[in-house]
Image (cartoon, helix red, strand yellow):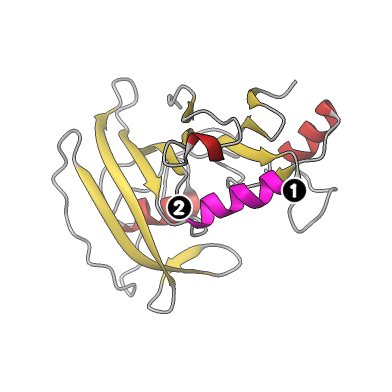
């Protein structure tokens, strides 16, 4: 059975592998990629409604609702930004070589020290393929914490949290500050990570800002091993 991390009468939380869709894409059920939500429905014999999604090449925790009331309530949590999602990322050392010369970008060189934290504000728009910075875009905020270099691979290790939920927000924010995620060729990586995967994993869902009586049985937080 697909890895279930949490399950009660209102919600389930599952681990989505990279290369698997959260829900069917615009191509419908016959997509070339497996679909986590459909697989769970078949295995458990229940109808699921996704509360949020992860990009195809991103692994991590996904919350599904098991009934209409739970889905409505959980959507409100995410709209009000009271659920905190934390991701682990591996990136390249800082470089702006992947950003075309004509793109307006401040290209600030950052001297990194362990546990250095950032609040990255921006405006994000997107086309069919990717997100990009634009004065006409929607406001975004990413919280980033640099954790140091990976002891084995030497990649830069980060925890990142999307306060807003713009498409490809974390991928773009790391890239535009000069730190493309390993494997993410769309945003400037020149290294492979794994087939249909990038070095980004949603490892924590934090519900602690929601009153216990309103959580419908969800714990304060759900976390898995952040190692990629």
Q: Residue at x 82, y 26 (%)?
A: 43
Q: Nearer the viewer, residue 199 or 85?
A: 85
Q: Nearer the viewer, mark 1 or mark 2?
A: 1
Q: Nearer the viewer, residue 191 or 16?
A: 16
Circle 2 is placed at which residue position?
81
**Snapshot quadrant of residue 67:** top right
Q: Residue at x 40, y 74 (%)?
A: 134
Q: List x then y, in percent, for residue 34.
A: 75, 38
Identify whether 118 is placed above or below 9.
Answer: below
Mark nearer the N terminus (1 vs 2): 1
Q: Say which element carries label 1.
A: helix
Q: Residue at x 68, y 27 (%)?
A: 8
- Seen in the image, is 7 located left or right of residue 214? right
- Seen in the image, is 87 located left or right of residue 40? left
Q: Is residue 73 visible?
A: yes
**Snapshot quadrant of residue 117:** top left
Other-residue count near label 2 (Cα within 10 Å), few / some / many at <14 / 14–19 / ≥20 = some
Q: CA distance from mark 1 to mark 2?
A: 20 Å
Identity of the residue furthest to the bottom in this view:
136
Assess whether mark 2 and mark 1 are in contact (beta carbons under 8 angstroms).
no
Residue 68 numbered mark, or none: 1
Q: List x then y, in percent, for residue 85.
A: 45, 41
Q: Magenta segment: does it hold 14?
A: no
Q: Is residue 34 visible?
A: no
Q: Over which residues does the magenta segment extend?
A: 68-81
**Majority secondary structure in the magenta region:** helix
């Amino acid at each position: 059975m697909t890895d279930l991390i949490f399950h009660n009468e209102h919600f389930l939380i599952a681990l989505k592998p990279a290369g698997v869709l959260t829900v069917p894409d615009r191509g419908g059920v016959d997509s070339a990629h497996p679909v986590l939500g459909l697989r769970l429905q078949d295995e458990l014999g229940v109808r699921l409604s996704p509360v949020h999604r992860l990009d195809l090449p991103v692994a991590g925790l996904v919350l599904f609702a098991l009934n209409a009331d739970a889905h409505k309530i959980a959507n409100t949590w995410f709209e009000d930004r009271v659920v905190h999602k934390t991701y682990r990322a591996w990136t390249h050392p800082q470089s702006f070589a992947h950003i075309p010369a004509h793109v307006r970008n401040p290209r600030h060189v950052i001297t990194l020290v362990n546990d250095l934290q950032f609040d990255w504000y921006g405006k994000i728009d997107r086309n069919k393929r990717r997100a990009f910075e634009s004065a006409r875009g929607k406001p975004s905020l990413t919280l980033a914490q640099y954790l140091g270099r990976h002891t084995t691979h030497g990649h830069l290790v980060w925890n990142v949290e999307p306060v807003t939920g713009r498409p490809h927000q974390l991928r773009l924010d790391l890239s535009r500050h000069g730190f493309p995620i390993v494997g993410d060729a769309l945003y400037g990586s020149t290294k492979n990570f794994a087939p249909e995967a990038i070095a980004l994993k949603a490892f924590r869902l934090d519900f602690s800002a929601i009153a216990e009586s309103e959580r419908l049985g969800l714990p304060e937080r759900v976390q898995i091993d952040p190692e990629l």
